[in-house]
Image: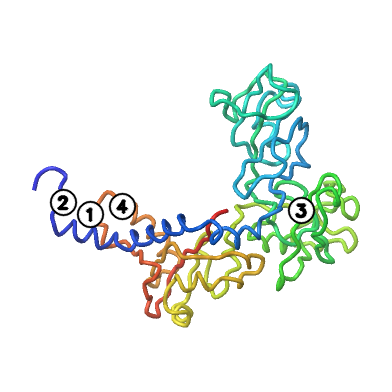
Amino acid sequence: QTGSRLPKSSAHSRARAMAPLLRASAAVAALLVAPTSALERPNRALFQGKDKCMKTLWPDVVDHCVANVGYHGSCQARIGKFQAKYGGSCDAYCSSFGFQCTYGLEVSADAPAAGCGDAASESYFQCSERRPSAEAVCTCTDSSDTFLWLGAKKLCGAGRALVDASGADGGGSAAAVGAGAVAAIPPPKGLVSASTCEEFCTMQGLTCTASEEPTAPGSCVAASVAASQRCDGRFDAERGGLCRCSGSFDRTGSYRWPDRLETCAAGSVLVAGAVLKEMGGTCERYCSGLRKRVAGFEHLHYSCYAACPAQKLGCAAFRESGALQAQAESSTNAISAVPVSDCHTDMAGMDAVCSCSFLDL
């Protein structure tokens, strides 16, 4: 054999090994071309109307650009005092209230006094770049997805929330809950209200980094540094507590999925073979069976996108499968070792790592 052509036997084994992945890709493609109404409505209900950007907390805003954005929309605003107060940097601006910058847009000298307009591609600049301009458009994101946190009384900025020991009210609009905060989502049915910041952050699948005492009931202002307490300290009965949580919020809610032995990664869990057998033996049946069974995520329609036999390795099999798959792209010898199965493969009573997701809005 010469050139890059593989031996016929190697080509056949590669094709057999890749077949499950190709079928999974075809399934995803079928979902993507399905009618919009059939796909988006069930999942959209969970996120619709949520103030993802929390723009009531953004300082020095000349124009909000878009009053409210979608699930994946950009959080963008036209900012004043850009050079004088923030050194001409969107990085400095976004970080001033706990968000992260994604990019900036220049505002031309002849731009209208208000509005964000349609920026030309040459007006884009990187977050770390500095522009000697009085105004600029900054795009900022909250990596903690604070707008999706459940059980808070108020959201006090990126990664920070006011929690009421007597239970979250979650009602009203951003204006109704007062300046410096936005309306939050009440705790889902089946989940008890938190009494400590450690409990509250754990409810979000995050880690507590700070617990503070507010100056007054309903306030997002911390009383003092001295009033800070341990994450496992109980809230004041009258004022509640201010919780800071860190980590990457798992939008699939896999940290709450039932019948899991272990959470391997966001959207991927280890499931016992006996459980799979009762549900039809496949990861696809497990994922689709999550509908209305995940507290706080009842609206989501889940589907399987990957399955991995645990082979008595637990979550380690899932992590190794990724490394082996990377090898498989460059070596035909590694192909047969990749422990990846089709979502519809019957695991025959064996433990497996099931990866489930929902169609993004």
Q: Distance of mark 1 from mark 4, alpha carbons?
A: 9 Å
Q: Which of marks 1 and 2 is nearer the N terminus?
A: 2
Q: Distance of mark 4 from mark 2, alpha carbons?
A: 17 Å
Up-down: is 286 above or below 63? below
Secondary structure beneath label 1: helix
Residue highlighted by disc 4: 327
Instruction: Please say if the residues under marks 1 and 4 sit with CB atoms less than 8 Å apart.
Output: no
* Rendered location of residue 164, percent (x, y): 83, 61
Tell me the quarter of the picture where residue 199 sits: bottom right
Residue placed most toward the observer, 314 or 357: 357
Instruction: Please say if the residues under marks 1 and 2 sit with CB atoms less than 8 Å apart.
Output: yes
Q: Earlier in the sequence, mark 1 or mark 4?
A: 4
Residue highlighted by disc 2: 6
Secondary structure beneath label 3: strand
Q: Is residue 180 left or right of residue 9?
A: right
Query: Hey, what amino acid is under mark 3?
Result: Ala
Residue at horizontal 52 percent and vertical 69 percent from the top: 262
Q: Which of marks 2 and 3 is nearer the N terminus?
A: 2
Residue placed most toward the observer, 262 or 147: 147
Q: Earlier in the sequence, mark 1 or mark 3?
A: 3
Residue highlighted by disc 3: 161
Query: Hey, what amino acid is under mark 1?
Result: Thr
Query: Hey, what amino acid is under mark 4?
Result: Gln
Query: Hey, what amino acid is under mark 2?
Result: Leu
Q: Distance of mark 1 from mark 3, alpha carbons?
A: 51 Å
On residue 332, the disc is 1
